[in-house]
Structure formats: structure tokens, C-alpha cells
Image: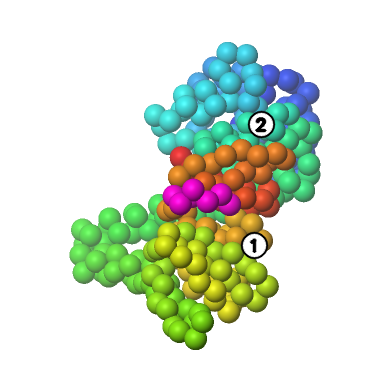
Amino acid sequence: MTIRTMLVDDEKLAIQGLRLRLEPFADIEVIATCANGREAIRRIKTEKPDLVFLDIQMPGFDGFGVVKGVMEIEPPLFVFVTAYEEHAIRAFEANAVNYLMKPVDPDKLADTVERVRQRLAEKKSAEEADKLKNVLAQVAPDQAQAMDEGETETSDRFEKLINVKDQGRIFRVEVDTIERIEAAGDYMVIYTAENSRILRETMKDLERRLDPRTFQRVHRSWIVNLDQVRQVKPHTNGECFLVLESGAEVKVSRSYRDVVARFVH
């Protein structure tokens, strides 16, 4: 699959450097370059790229203005490329795939391209599934209903209750009430709005039991319920804190910061 890509930066050298770094990726096809935000909005609407590498600070429309300017169409995937780290939280609020610092690190660029491939593959799969359901709804309504029921069964395979043995008693914790989970060696501390319970289980094993659409690892020691997040607070070095409904704050490490993009819109 060819990934039709656009580069947007007011510095010619930056565009040339990024184009050079993208050459090893055979599926990346640079179809256009733009030197300002106004031109980028126009070209995105006409060219309809899959991916846009976007500088933030530009004369006229900045990078965030470009994103806002194309929301009336189905927007491409965005990767922000900038020399200013303080824009990281806004970048993920704009649902960016990633946020790269200049000069672009080759390993981080490779990781970003892989994320783009995954996002596009997921999008294509979802579109094909929708098309199939629409066709089935017309020619075989029973099959279409079976597909919908199958999706429900997928979500049902995750735990709704977790039994926790604590202080010689067994407590049944409703998964929906869990706010966050902290790793402490071979033990997990499960926090709800009312109390906390200690569960003897590894983080890896517990992750398998929880719906990843709701529960996400944001740090090597923390899993959070994304439905409980009410605010994102920026921190240093591209890290941030999630403020939960209880007021508790959980640090998102840089290696998990793409999680922010999945629920902050």
C-alpha cells in the first residue's frame, strides 16, 4: 500500500532533510510540499493525502490552524515536526499520530511510520467491514445482524468482574468502577472511587483480562481507565499527567504518550 504523503514547513532545508530521511521507506510517496499553512489547507483538500508531516510555527496559519482548516473533509493522519517541545500536548489533542522534534531522529521516524501503517490498516479494515455490512443488510439481513452480534461478543470476552482476595476475604470488583491500577512487583493495587484492593497478579496477565479500548498502560507501573480521565496536564520532556475523576494524577511516560491521542479529541 502506497502512503501518499505531504510535507509542510516554511523552511526549505527542513523539507529537504525530511524528504531525505523518508527515502528508505518504500511505501512513502511524497506527492507535494508546502511552505505555509494556507497553501497546505488548499493542497490537502485537493490532493487528499493519507499522511501530512506538519511544522507548527509558520507564518499565517500555524500547524494547528491547518488541522482545524481541513476538519470539514475527512482529514489525513498528521505528524507534527517542530523544534518546540511545549506544543506536545496540543499535538496529541489534535489527534496527531506522533510529535517529532527537529532534527528528526531516524529511529523515532521509523516508529512513526509504523504507527501510520497500523492506523491506515485499521481504517481500511473498518471501512471494508462497514461496506460488507451495508451490502449484507440489503441482500442478507440475517448475516448483517450476525456480524453486529459478533462485535458485541468481542467486547463481552473481557472481564466484567474481578475477584480480589484481600485480608482473607474475596471482594468482587466491577471493572467499570476501576479508575487506575498500579504495579507493585507481583502485586497489583486496584483503585476505585471508594477504596483500593491488592491483587496478586502480574501487570501483563491483568492487561489480557481488560478491554484495551478502555484500559491502557500509560507507564510501566500504571494502567488507567480512559473513561475516568478528565484532564491532561503537560510536564517536561514530552511527558504529561492524566488527571482522573477522583483528582488523582498519573504520569504518562514518553514511551506511552501516543495513548493520549486515542482519547483526547
Give the x, y percent position of residue 33.
64, 25
From the viewer's side, name the closer residue of 240 and 79. 240
Residue at image position (66%, 31%) is 86
Residue toward you, 110 or 93? 93
Is disc 2 placed on a helix, strand or loop? helix
- Which residue appears farthest toward the top when viewing the image? 60
Give the percent coordinates (x, y) of residue 225.
47, 58
- Residue at horizontal 63 percent and vertical 26 percent from the top: 56
- Residue under label 2, please give it: 86
Crowding at label 2, few (<14), some or many (≥20) Cα neighbours within 10 Å?
some
Amino acid type, residue under disc 1 in the picture:
Ser
Asked whether 255 or 54 is in front, the reply is 255
Colouring mode (rainbow / by chain / secondary structure / one colour): rainbow
Q: Is residue 32 left or right of residue 156?
A: right
Q: Nearer the viewer, mark 2 or mark 1?
A: 1
The vertical placement of 67 against 111, above or below, is: above
Is disc 1 surrounded by few (<14), some (14 to 19) or many (20+) residues within 10 Å?
some
* Residue type for callout 2: Glu
Q: Mark on residue 187?
A: none
Residues shaded magenta: 244-250
User: Which image quarter: residue 60?
Assistant: top right
Image quadrant of residue 220? bottom right
Q: Is residue 194 magenta?
A: no
Q: Earlier in the sequence, mark 2 or mark 1?
A: 2
The percent position of residue 136, horizontal first and vertical second, equals: 26, 62
* Residue located beneath label 1 in the image: 221
Task: Give the residue drawn at x 73%, y 35%.
Answer: 101
Queried whether the magenta region covers residue 249, the answer comes back as yes
- Measured as percent of width and height from the top left, residue 208 is found at 53, 72
